[in-house]
Amino acid sequence: MTETTIDRGDGIALAYRLTTGRSPTLVFLPGFMSDMSGDKASHLAALCEAKGHACLRLDYSGHGASGGAFQDGTIGRWTQDALFLIDRLTEGKLILVGSSMGGWIALLAAIARPGRIAGLIGIAAAPDFTETLIRPSLTPGQHETLARDGVLRVPSAYGGEQIFTRALLEDGRKNLLLGGQIPITCPVRLLQGQRDEEVPWQTALRIAECLGSTDVRVTLIKDGTHRLSRPQDLTLLTSTAGLLLENSP
């Protein structure tokens, strides 16, 4: 399936892949500087196709096949991109699956559309990462560069570079979730590797503690890394998603 795009209303084209099927629709939300073409997204799309469920994969602005500059994006902007596509392309109940930053966006989207969410899966979910992970990792010199130039480029552990902007960090502070109760009551499943060098595994426990839902399960994978994309990780993900699809109203 090739990407399709839709203008979000300001000349920026958002890319997506939509498989039609019955409700609930599974929506995959990728991570920071990632996209909808990875193994986790493709395995979930195959699961939905096999079970006859609709599936929406998407790229936020500045990511993957979507238009726009990455530097112009923020957590709030990318959440709005996701909601724009969800509102225009799906009907009925949703199961949101968010990877890393996508887990933060999934939580924000679930709060924004409470009546539509039948379930949520976080894969190394990273709410508040701009505040708890990025800010503390920067040197005084990097903080000065960010304050002066508004943008900072640092080497990525996965090759290339990561881009952090002052707007990203400032907007992140407006969307923090782990300081109080998260008003989400649907079933939530959190998958987290304990060898994750990007997001501390204790973050999953903190998310579970903050969630209003009582139907929350945290699965810790002792030898799992941040990507959780080995064959056994993908099997765990698809089985988790399959159970939510089967048990959703």
Image (tube, rainbow, N blue to C red):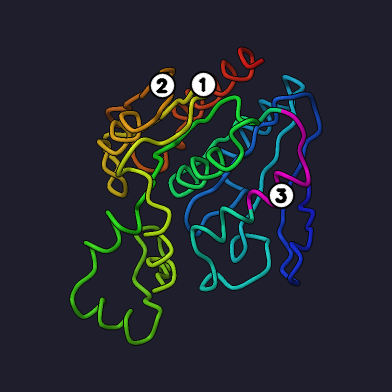
> Mark 2 or 3 closer to N-term?
3
Q: Is residue 48 above or below residue 154?
A: above
Q: Residue at x 36, y 23 (%)?
A: 219
Tag 2 and tag 3, C-beta contact below 8 Å = no
Tag 3 and tag 1, C-beta contact below 8 Å = no
**Are there few (<14), some (14-19), or many (20+) residues within 10 Å of tag 1?**
some
In this rendering, would 110 be left or right of 216? right
Q: Residue at x 27, y 54 (%)?
A: 132
**Residue 145 is inside the magenta segment:** no
Q: Locate residue 131, reporting x and y percent.
A: 30, 58
Tag 2 and tag 1, C-beta contact below 8 Å = no
Q: Is residue 152 above or below residue 134?
A: below
**Predominant SS along the magenta part:** helix
Which label was assigned to residue 216? 2
Chain part drawn in magenta:
82-92
Q: Locate residue 123, reporting x and y percent.
A: 44, 36
The residue at which mark 1 appears reads as 240
